[in-house]
Structures are given as C-alpha cells and as structure tokens.
C-alpha cells in the first residue's frame, strides 16, 4: 500500500542467483503426512466376467479425488465409471508386462468428485481370463482443477520392479505408486511410501515429496513379468467444509462477478497483509488467518517477494534470514527453502477458506530487478511459478503495485507482463489481475493487459464509486484493490509519516469506500490496515479493529440477497432525489485528485432488473432520499441496516405498495458508532 506522495524505490537488490540442484533424494513424508490427504481405500478381485464393481466403504466427500487402479489379464481395453456420475480420465497405461500370460495395468482418476455413496465399475472389452483386480482410493486436499503432475510407467522381467522417475515442482506433492506381478507377492517397498492396498502380487502405495525434484518407487517381486506406475499429484491444502470451492474464475453468464468451481457467485472480501510471508511465522499466520476468517474475510493480498518498500528487508529475506534467491543472474535460481515456506503459507490460507492474491514481484520494490533480469528470464521465472503453483487452488495472480511508470516505460510493462505470460504458459487454472498507478486507475487503463487479465482491479483515493463504475463497464468483473487504509489518520496512531490521510482513514470512510464499491458494480473489495500491510510494531493490538469487524457486516448482508444481480442505479431511476453530489474522481485544474472521501455525501444505489431487490447506501442520516416504489414488482418491505453492527431497524408503514410511487425515506439518526451512514434494504414480495 502506498500513499500518493510515496514513490517506488529505485535500488536493485544485490541478489545474485545460482542454479538450483537438479536432483532430490527420495525422502517423502510418510505416515502422518499422508493422513492429511488419504481418506479411504478398497479393493476386489474377480476370476471371470466383463465388469468388476466396488463400493466405497463410506460416502465420498465433495471435491475430493478418486484414484482407480485396474489390473487384468484378458485382451482389450478397460473403462472406469461410477454411480455418482464422476468422469474418469486415464492417468497412465495400459502398461503390459512380459511373459506367457501378460498382465495389463492402468491408473485412472476423477477430480472434484460429488459427495455421497459411490460404486466404481471397471468394464472390460473382453471377458476376464483368470484375474482382474480393482483398487479404489479417495484423497482430499488435491487441486480441483489441475491435480495432475508428472507420470511414469515401466515393465520388466527382473526381480526388481521400478516405476521410473517423476519430477515434482513444489514441496509436498502426493506420490501414488502401483505395482502388479505374475508372481505370488511383492515386498521391500521403497522407504517413505505406505502401502494402501494389497492383493497377492499387487500393491498400491502413497507418500509425500519433501521438495521439488526426481522421485521413484520400487519393490521386489517373485514372479516373471511385472508392471509399475507412479503419479505425482498437486496437494493444494484442505479447505474448510462448506466454503467456496477454489480456484475462482469469471462467471460464464456475466462480467459482473466471479464464481467458484460450483458456479456460486463469490463476493471477494479481502485484506492486505502484503508482507506476511517475510514477517510472520506459520503460527502467527495461522492466528491471523483464523481471525480474518472469523471477521468475514475470504481473501488476502500478499507479496511473494517483499523488500523494504512493502514492509520487508532490503535483501528480501524472511524474519529468520531466508532470502528468495541463490547467487547468480537476477531471478535465475529460486531458493527452495524460501518457496517451500511460501507453499506452507498458501496451504495454511486454504485451511481457513482464504484465497491469496499473490503478487510474484510487486513493482515498488522489485521492478528494477525485473528489468535487470530482462523479459526472457522474467518469462522463465513466471514458468517456474506456474509449474509450482498451478495446482494450488486458492490463488489469484496479482501484478503491479503502485505501477507509476506503466504509461511511459515500455520495458517495465514488458518485464511485468513477461512474468504473467510465463505463468500462463504453465498454469491455466488461475485468474490474473493488475494494479496500476495511484491516485486513480483501473487495470484496463492500459489496454495491453486486456488479453492477460480476467479480473480488473480498481485503485483510488477518491470516492470509490466513480472509478468502479468506469471499470464495471469495461467487460471484466472488477474489485476495489486499494483505497484509504485503516489507522493512517495522523501521527497519533503511531505510524511513521507520510502515511496520514486524516478522516479519510477512519472507520466511517472505510465503510463508505466498501459500500460505494459494492453498490457500483464491484465483485468485491480489499480492506487495508496501516499496521498489518507491513506488520509494523504493535500490529497485534491493532489488526482486530472496529473497521475490520465492520467489513464482515457488509459481506453478511450482501450474501443474504442476490447481490450479484444488482445493477448500479446510474440513471437515478430508483433513488430519484436526495442522492447528493457525484465526484467523478478526475484531477482538478491543478492536477490534484479530490481525496475527501469523508466529506462526500453521494448516495449509491443498485437494484435487480426483476424488480425484487434494491440496496441504497446513505452516507448522511440528515440526507432524506426519494425512492420510486413503482419500480418494484410487488409490495416492498423496507428496513434500515446499521453497517456498524449488522442490526436492522423496522420502518413504519412497511411494506409499501408500488402504487405509492415516489416515497420519501429518512435514516433513523446516528448509527451504532454515532456516525450518520445507513443502508436501506428494499425487498419486494
């Protein structure tokens, strides 16, 4: 977060990078580690027939992943289906063993499965000769959209059965191994794997990788021919039950909002702890995320790289000394220990149902390093991030950050966009957005981002409705990425200058920014706190603030109605009088932006086209408004909502008949914080 009078730093970090070691020994986490992902397994064997059926012992959980392993000795192919209607794709195979009576083995998977009882069926093209086996496994915490990493298969006749090698690209990927032999038994499974299913000379097993690199699995077998297969899956982290199913994406029906994987509209309620990765321990982050979840936040903006410009250290190191790169050319050699910790933070956020707006190299402190690296290396850095985080569901890629030079510095735009293009080259699962310059901007002010972003970010220190409306009409869902931050009022708050914004940074103004945005077409907003974007001293006494708590009241009310169908009342057809003064947010004759959010009295309103719902935000209780009830399809129940405590007040005479036409409404004095702002909720029966 940067105020208008702060300029991006210009120093290049003295980070010289060297190549990462290419090889990692097989030391996967075993036992307790796999318990986080493993749910259940069953197996069955038949001697004759053309299909084998197997029911899970317990109902599947929504969003989990099923791995099916089929072994058969007859000719032809096999197909896998289930009673829940999940779709199965082949992972690897069919792999055929050598010998007089060859075996065939194939792995299948179904991602993002439906909840409920389930029977899996393997159907064969020809009748089973003497042996067919089906093993089914359920796992949780794997990516809903892009769970699959690398696969390997092998066949042979020796005593050692070896899967061959797969390469993982992030820490803690799930490794699933399967072996089948025409002998009597298999033994001496590679250390680090845990056997999940056994039937004679067939075994399935799993483990977790510790770090990116090559992995394999092996057993000893007593027969002649054997087959072996290995798959790496992306472990995204297990979200809380009942939350949004990540990753987010644009709605196919409207450019108004984003949705989760179940097509549920997602109201983004964000916070901006930008320096969290470098300033907090995992324990502190867990406490922070837990609090933010309890306050109604479901997203956080965090910088993947963070130096002194955004609350970190000059070399980009964590609080305990981990720097993000080894020695060598800029961006060329990511330090595994640093990025493995980032992995943990992102999975931790998933546990609390929080999406991370992840900035790969924000442009206040890291633009010079990007420019020194050049577009080719920036693209390769993006590819690295895409490979590593393509299977982490709870991410939205965020670029920029006070990107002041975008309109005059083509090289700067080129390297930032090269990172975005590199990520897209290896990760197609996540949305992208970009924050441009203060004092007022929208992502598509720079049309060159049009093909790269899915979500537009509005950045303004003026009354937020003006730029939100501009971005709302640009054909992308938009959200308020940054405006005035909590506590940045004056020196009495204890923050260092020049972060003072007076009354514009008090709770009432922060409420105004959020409500103005949501009733002007936004799909969400991001709250900011002067103590926690950089975790300044005493942040633990300041982060659970009055304003932070009040952001949850906004989300709770909007999610109780069809907020995503609301259309801004730009023509004043709903609120026909008393709507105050609209500030267009444009610079004045002296080139300055009117930042007087606290003084602006403009009333924002939005209504659904079907005439069943309208919401009106009134900044001043002394400001009576007129509502055209004829716009509603039925008697209108009207209530006042207090944005400071989430409580309703009845309105005398409600419900009102549409035939009344122009109806005056006056807010009921001061709200729970002794402030004059209220929300009017109008619902037609």
Image (spheres, rainbow, N blue to C red):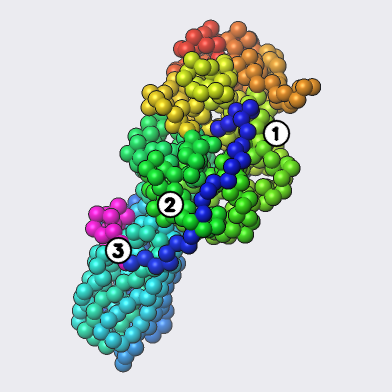
Q: Is residue 53 left or right of residue 439?
A: left
* Magenta-highlighted residues: 26-42
How many C-alpha atoms fall within 10 Å of the one at disc 2: few (<14), some, or many (≥20)?
A: many
> Circle 2 sits on which residue?
339
Q: Quadrant of residue 459?
A: top right
Of the numbered discs in the image, which one, if any, rests on residue 27?
Answer: 3
Point out the tag, 1 or 2, that comes first from the N-terminus. Answer: 2
Depicted 227 relative to depicted 306: above or below: below
User: Marks 2 and 3, how far apart in space?
Assistant: 18 Å
Q: Residue at left 27%, top 62%?
A: 41
Q: Which mark is residue 284?
A: none
Dividing the image into 4 quarters, which one contains the C terminus? Answer: top right
* Residue 318 image point, x, y percent: 42, 43
Q: Is residue 10 visible?
A: yes
Q: Secondary structure at mark 2?
A: helix
**Mark 1 touches mark 3? (CB < 8 Å):** no
Reply yes or no: does residue 27 show up in magenta.
yes
The residue lying at 54 percent from left, 46 percent from top is 13
Near-viewer residue (574 or 591): 591
Question: Viewer-nearest of labels 1 and 2?
Answer: 2
* Residue 421 within the segment the image draws in magenta: no
Q: Nearer the viewer, mark 1 or mark 3?
A: 3
Secondary structure beneath label 1: helix
Q: Which residue is mark 1?
A: 470
Q: Please determine whether, in this image, residue 137 is positioned above or below residue 361.
A: below
């Amino acid at each position: 977060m940067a105020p208008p009078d702060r300029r991006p730093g210009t120093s290049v970090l003295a980070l010289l990078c060297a190549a990462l070691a290419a090889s990692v020994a097989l030391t996967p986490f075993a036992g307790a580690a796999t318990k986080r992902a493993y749910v259940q397994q069953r197996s069955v064997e038949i001697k004759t027939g053309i299909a084998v059926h197997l029911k899970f012992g317990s109902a599947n959980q929504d969003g989990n992943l099923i791995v099916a392993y089929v072994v058969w000795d007859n000719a032809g192919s096999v197909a896998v289906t289930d009673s829940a209607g999940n779709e199965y794709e082949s992972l690897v195979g069919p792999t055929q063993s050598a010998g007089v009576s060859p075996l065939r083995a194939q792995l299948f998977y179904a991602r993002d499965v439906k909840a409920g009882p389930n029977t899996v069926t393997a159907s064969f093209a020809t009748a089973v000769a003497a042996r067919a086996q089906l093993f089914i496994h359920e796992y949780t915490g794997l990516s809903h959209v892009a769970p699959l990493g690398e696969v390997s298969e092998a066949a042979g006749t020796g005593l050692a059965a070896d899967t061959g090698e797969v390469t993982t690209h992030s820490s803690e990927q799930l490794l699933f191994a399967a072996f089948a032999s025409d002998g009597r038994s298999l033994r001496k499974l590679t250390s680090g794997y845990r056997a999940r299913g056994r039937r004679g000379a067939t075994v399935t097993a799993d483990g977790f990788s510790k770090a990116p690199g090559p992995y394999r699995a092996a057993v000893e077998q007593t027969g002649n021919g054997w087959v072996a297969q290995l798959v790496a899956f992306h472990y995204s982290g297990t979200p809380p039950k009942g939350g949004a199913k990540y990753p987010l994406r644009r709605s196919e029906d409207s450019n108004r909002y984003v949705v989760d994987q179940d097509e549920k509209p997602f109201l983004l309620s964000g916070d901006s702890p930008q320096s969290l990765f470098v300033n907090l321990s995992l324990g502190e982050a867990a406490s922070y995320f837990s609090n933010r979840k309890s306050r109604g936040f479901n997203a956080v903006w965090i910088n993947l790289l963070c130096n002194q410009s955004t609350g970190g250290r000059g070399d980009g190191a964590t609080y305990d000394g981990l720097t993000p790169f080894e020695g060598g050319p800029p961006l060329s050699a990511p330090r595994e220990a640093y990025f493995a910790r980032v992995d943990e933070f992102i999975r931790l956020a998933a546990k609390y149902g929080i999406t991370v707006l992840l900035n790969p190299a924000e442009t206040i402190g890291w633009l010079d390093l990007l420019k020194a690296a050049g577009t080719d290396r920036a693209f390769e850095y993006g590819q690295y991030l895409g490979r590593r985080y393509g299977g982490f569901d709870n991410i939205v890629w965020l670029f920029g950050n006070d990107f002041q030079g975008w309109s005059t510095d083509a090289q700067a735009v080129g390297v930032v966009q090269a990172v975005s293009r590199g990520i897209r080259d290896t990760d197609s699962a996540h949305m992208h957005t970009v924050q441009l310059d203060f004092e007022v901007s929208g992502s598509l002010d720079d049309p060159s981002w049009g093909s790269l972003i899915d979500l537009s970010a509005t950045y303004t220190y003026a009354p937020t409705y003006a730029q939100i409306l501009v971005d709302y009409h640009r054909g992308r869902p938009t959200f308020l990425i940054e405006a005035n931050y909590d506590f940045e009022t004056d020196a009495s708050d204890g923050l260092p200058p020049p972060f003072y914004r007076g009354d514009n940074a008090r709770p009432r103004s922060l409420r105004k920014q959020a409500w103005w945005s949501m009733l002007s077409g936004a799909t969400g907003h991001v709250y900011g706190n002067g103590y926690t974007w950089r975790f300044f001293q005493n942040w633990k006494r300041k982060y659970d603030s009055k304003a932070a708590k009040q952001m949850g009241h906004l989300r709770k009310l909007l999610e109780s109605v069809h907020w995503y169908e609301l259309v801004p009342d730009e023509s004043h057809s709903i609120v026909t009088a008393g709507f105050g003064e609209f500030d267009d947010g444009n610079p004045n004759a002296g080139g300055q932006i009117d930042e007087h959010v606290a003084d602006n009295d403009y009333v924002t309103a939005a209504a659904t086209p079907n005439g069943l719902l309208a919401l009106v935000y009134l900044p001043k209780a002394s400001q009576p408004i007129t509502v055209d009830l004829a716009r509603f399809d039925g008697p209108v129940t009207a209530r006042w909502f207090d944005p400071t405590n989430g409580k309703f007040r009845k309105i005398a005479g409600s419900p009102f008949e549409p035939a009344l036409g122009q109806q005056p409404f006056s807010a009921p004095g001061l709200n729970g914080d002794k402030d004059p702002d209220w929300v009017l909720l109008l619902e037609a029966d």
